[in-house]
Amino acid sequence: MAASTWSGYLTFGLISMPVRLFSGARSSGISFNMLHRPDKSRLKQQYYCPVDNRVVEILEFVKATDVDPVYFESSYYMVPEEAGRRPYALLSKALEESDYVAIAKITMHNREYTVFLRPTSGGMMLHTMYYQDEVKKVEGFGAPDVELKDSELKVAHQLIEALAGKWEPEKYKDSFQENLKQMIETKLAGGEVVEVEQPKKLAPVIDLMAALKASLEQMEGRKKPAASADTVVEIAASAAPRKKSKGK
């Protein structure tokens, strides 16, 4: 097992349990190192916690649905020590059944953090939290002041269903990093790096219904169709303005 980044006690009322934290995620992209000019040795920046066995104090519980994911920063697995297995299991099960997350305080890496404790897969994850003044606001963000047609929404829902799938994080890849690795390997082997074709500039959508229809038809060959072509034509026809016949 990897080395823990923190160890201490989680307190819940008068109950305390020994736990450890393990880093939950890290970037795996290509990075470049700084070298010491005289001997070409790699320069390192080291982080350490000078004080161990601190306490994670639970302050309150809030509904999980009330927490905006924008407040989540870094993620850690919280694992109980042998003496804390039973109270750990009790708390994680209670949080899961009640749909609550715990808000707590922790001191780690010479800094105090406010954190979330979230139940998942029978255990608990700890997420450090951005504070309110760290979450940026963007002027003008929100629902645009436009009127949407029912027919447009219907086809948009069908397009979503056509692209729907199971959550499988392993199928998503960082194509930029893969291409960068391939370019480095090609250069090391003495090959020539071919310049990639620049993506075409996209034009704003003028006819939204036509764009929705074309997108839905494009998806039919890739995944299960969300609706038959006749249904799409009927929806498009109902949304299109009718031409008046001559003489009337």
Image: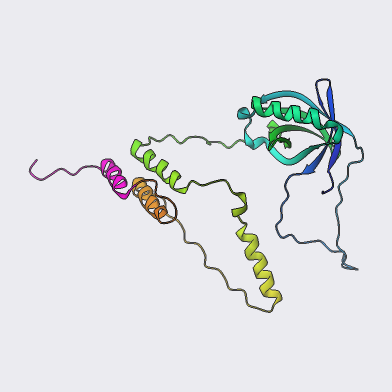
- Res 136 visible: no
182 horizontally vs 53: left or right: left
Instruction: Identify the residue at horizontal 76%, vertical 40% (top origin).
Output: 77
Q: Is residue 229 left or right of residue 81?
A: left
- Residue with the most extreme left position: 247
Quarter of the image with the C terminus is: top left
Would residue 110 appear left or right of 143 to someone viewing this image?
A: right
Report if residue 220 lies within the magenta region.
no
Q: Position of residue 76 (x, y in %)?
A: 75, 41
Q: Nearer the viewer, residue 220 or 45?
A: 220
- Vertical position of residue 233 compared to residue 192: above or below: above
Residue 53 rendering spot, x and y as whole percentages: 90, 34
* Residue 9, quarter of the rendered image: top right
Q: Is residue 109 above or below residue 100?
A: below
User: Compared with residue 83, is residue 45 higher up or lower down, i.e. above or below?
Assistant: below
**Horizontal and vertical percent position of residue 149:** 35, 37
User: Which residue is more in the foreground, 4 or 186?
Assistant: 4
Q: What is the quadrant of residue 8 in the picture?
A: top right
* Residue 82 relative to residue 144: left or right: right
Which residue is found at the position 30% from the left and 42% from the top?
235
Residue 24, image x and y in percent? Answer: 74, 44
Magenta-tinted stretch? 228-248
Residue 177 is at least partly visible in this image:
yes
